[in-house]
Amino acid sequence: MMREIIYSLPEQIREAAGSVPERLFRNRVYDNALICGMGGSGISGEIAAALYPQVRITVNKDYLVPGFVDKKTLAILVSYSGNTEETLANYGQLLRRGIDMVLISSDGKLHKKKAGRKIKVPAGLPPRGALGYLFTPLPMIMRRANLIPRDPRRELQELAAFLAGQRDRIEEMARGLAPGFAGRLIILYADSAAFVPVANRWRCQLNENAKVFAHYNVIPEMNHNEIVGLGRPEKFNPDTSVIFINDPLSHPRNRTRRRLLKSLIGNELPAIVEISPKGKNVMQHMFWAIMLGDFVSYYLALEQGVDPLPVVRIEELKRKLAGHRQKIDKR
């Protein structure tokens, strides 16, 4: 089932591109956006923030809403299940402040909340498998709110067509890469701020689908700290893979930094893989790399003999939290 879910990403994007009503807002002026969401729902906000750096977008992954949020903030709450505890806490705080909200969910408590604008997405998927449904409305909403200047529908439709044409090749590449990561610690590096959400998505999918630990960071920041500790303790080096997820539009100095970093660590950490995304624009580059990571996590799960669908520890933690009914801080 997970393989079919990953494969369906282009169809999700195509379907979701028509999910946002034309007349969503009336005579409201916003100067920033707050996107609230956790895990497989929240990654959609990270991608949107990277794709639209001209918009002041804050991605909130906490119980508390930032203090700067005011009547000129458009809040978009994304919870696939509609029952995400942190996002529901955000809803209560935003409601008390009188902040305009758009709610995106498949059902659950969030869908039943009062809001002038709700978008319901298809149910029955793990949240991490609904990225197309959860991300695609975001640029559409921001356009309706006049936060971005151009209608994104054509770009989204082109993205869906591009991924549909590439997915078999992407899947074949992932099938070839995955065995090399079996039983290994995986370290992911993006070489641009735009690709940080891509590296984070790889980490999340490796965690949830393949049930492995993975770490990510970004160049140039890691050059100022992590580079010193990389490869220590040395006993883990033979079982470590380093994956560079390369933004085709990254800063030339970051590309130079990446090449120099490889030369510095190559003797200690020789298992280095470079990912070079395809596409004609940033959105296509990002989603090509995301789809590859999704498939890698799926085939790594199969390689290691684990079921990619269940996330037992997450469900167990939720059950234990339900037994602790502390009042959620509503500051």
Image (spheres, rainbow, N blue to C red):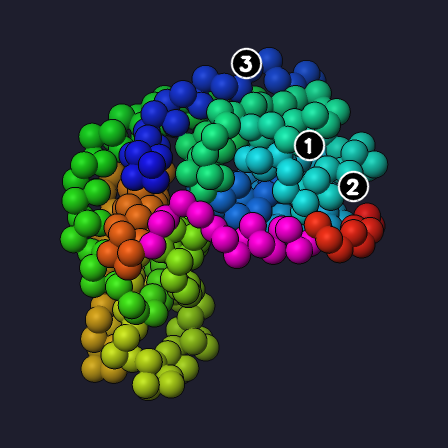
Considering the whole magenta stretch, tell me its main secondary structure: helix
Q: Where in the figure is residue 38, as x and y percent of width and height?
A: 57, 47
Q: Earlier in the sequence, mark 2 or mark 3?
A: 3
Q: Amino acid at mark 2?
A: Gln
Q: Is residue 236 above or below residue 2?
A: below
Q: Which mark is residue 55?
A: none
Q: Nearer the viewer, residue 292 or 319?
A: 319
Q: Earlier in the sequence, mark 1 or mark 3?
A: 3
Judge depth for marks 1 and 3 and give the one in front: 1
Tag 1 secondary structure = helix
User: Residue 101 occupies which quadrant of the picture?
Assistant: top right
Q: What segment is highlighted magenta in the picture?
A: 306-321
Q: Where in the figure is residue 155, as x and y percent of width and height?
A: 36, 27
**Residue 107 vs residue 196: left or right?**
right
Residue found 50% across the figure and 27% down from its top: 123
Whether tag 2 and tag 1 are in contact, CB under 8 A, the answer is no
Q: Which mark is residue 93?
A: 2
Residue 68 showing in the rendered view: yes
Residue found 28% across the figure and 46% down from its top: 295
Whether residue 311 is in magenta: the answer is yes
Q: Earlier in the sequence, mark 2 or mark 1?
A: 2
Give the residue at mark 1: 109
Judge depth for marks 2 and 1 and give the one in front: 1
Give the residue at mark 3: 22
Whether residue 93 is in magenta: the answer is no
Tag 3 secondary structure = loop
